[in-house]
Structures are given as structure tokens and as C-alpha cells.
């Protein structure tokens, strides 16, 4: 606890330019920031939605939901994940065999 307090005190003793860089890095860590230009809230919301889907935050939020999942849903999700994994492995094997044939000149 004392080390955290001393670290905080050292941050407060630094010049304001250092504090600004620390606070900006903390703000970047918190999530996505979107500017509203000319009071156009609709455009800012659509831009934020695109940023969230592209950065994966949306998937992370859905994964972190803490509601109860029925056992039947768990089985379905597990089966789908297994199917995706098997398809990916199958595709990897096919690509590997194609590349080996190309390298060998067959």
C-alpha cells in the first residue's frame, strides 16, 4: 500500500506536462473517445459504433456479460466452437498441402 501511495505522490510532484501525458495515457486505456463535430450526434454515434466493432470491444463486452446461460445453450455454443475449430484446422491442412505441392513443383 505504501508503494502505491509513494508512486502517486511522485506523480503529483512531477511537472504538469508529465501529468498531462500520464492522464492522456490513462484516458486512452479507458476506451474509445469520439469527438462530436458541429453538434452532429448521429454521425458521432455511428462512428463510435464502427470503432467499437472494429476494435473488438463489442465482442469483449458480450463475453463479459454475467447472466446465466442455460446448459442447452452452452452445448450449442460448444458445438459451434468445435465446428469452427475443425473447419479452421481442415483449411490449414489443405493450404499446407497445396503449399508443399507448389514448393516441390508437383
Image (cartoon, grey):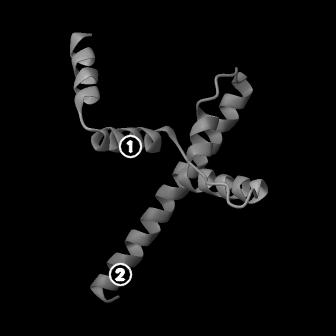
Q: Nearer the viewer, residue 11 or 73?
A: 11
Q: Quadrant of residue 106?
A: bottom left
**Is any atom of residue 81 visible in this view?**
no
Mark 1: few, some, or many residues within 10 Å (few <14, many ≥20)?
few
Q: Which residue is mark 2?
A: 101
**Is any atom of residue 72 visible in this view?**
yes
Looking at the image, residue 75 lies above or below residue 38: above
Residue at the farthest top position: 1
Mark 2: few, some, or many residues within 10 Å (few <14, many ≥20)?
few
Location of the N terminus (image quadrant): top left
Residue at 69% across, 36% down: 76
Q: Is residue 87 left or right of residue 23?
A: right
Looking at the image, residue 55 lies above or below residue 96: above
Q: Residue 80, percent across and down?
A: 64, 44
Label located before the other in sequence (1 or 2): 1
Q: Nearer the viewer, mark 1 or mark 2?
A: 1
Q: How many marks?
A: 2
Q: CA distance from mark 1 to mark 2?
A: 49 Å
As helix, strand or loop, the secondary structure at mark 1 comes to helix
As helix, strand or loop, the secondary structure at mark 2 comes to helix
Residue at 62% across, 54% down: 35
Q: Quadrant of residue 59?
A: top right
Q: Which residue is mark 1?
A: 25
Residue at 73% across, 27% down: 72
Q: Residue 60, percent across and down?
A: 56, 39
Q: Residue 58, percent across and down?
A: 62, 44
Q: Is residue 93 left or right of residue 43?
A: left
Q: Is residue 26 left or right of residue 56?
A: left
Q: Quadrant of residue 39?
A: bottom right
Circle on res. 87: none
Residue at 38% across, 70% down: 96
Q: Residue 51, percent across and down?
A: 60, 55
Amino acid at each position: 500500500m505504501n508503494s502505491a501511495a509513494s508512486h502517486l505522490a511522485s506523480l503529483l510532484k512531477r511537472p504538469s506536462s508529465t501529468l498531462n501525458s500520464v492522464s492522456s495515457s490513462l484516458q486512452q486505456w479507458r476506451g474509445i473517445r469520439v469527438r462530436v463535430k458541429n453538434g452532429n450526434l448521429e454521425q458521432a454515434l455511428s462512428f463510435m459504433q464502427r470503432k467499437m466493432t472494429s476494435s473488438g470491444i463489442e465482442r469483449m463486452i458480450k463475453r463479459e456479460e454475467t447472466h446465466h446461460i442455460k446448459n442447452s445453450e452452452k452445448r450449442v455454443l460448444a458445438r459451434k466452437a468445435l465446428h469452427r475449430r475443425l473447419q479452421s484446422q481442415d483449411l490449414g491442412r489443405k493450404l499446407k498441402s497445396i503449399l508443399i505441392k507448389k514448393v516441390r513443383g508437383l
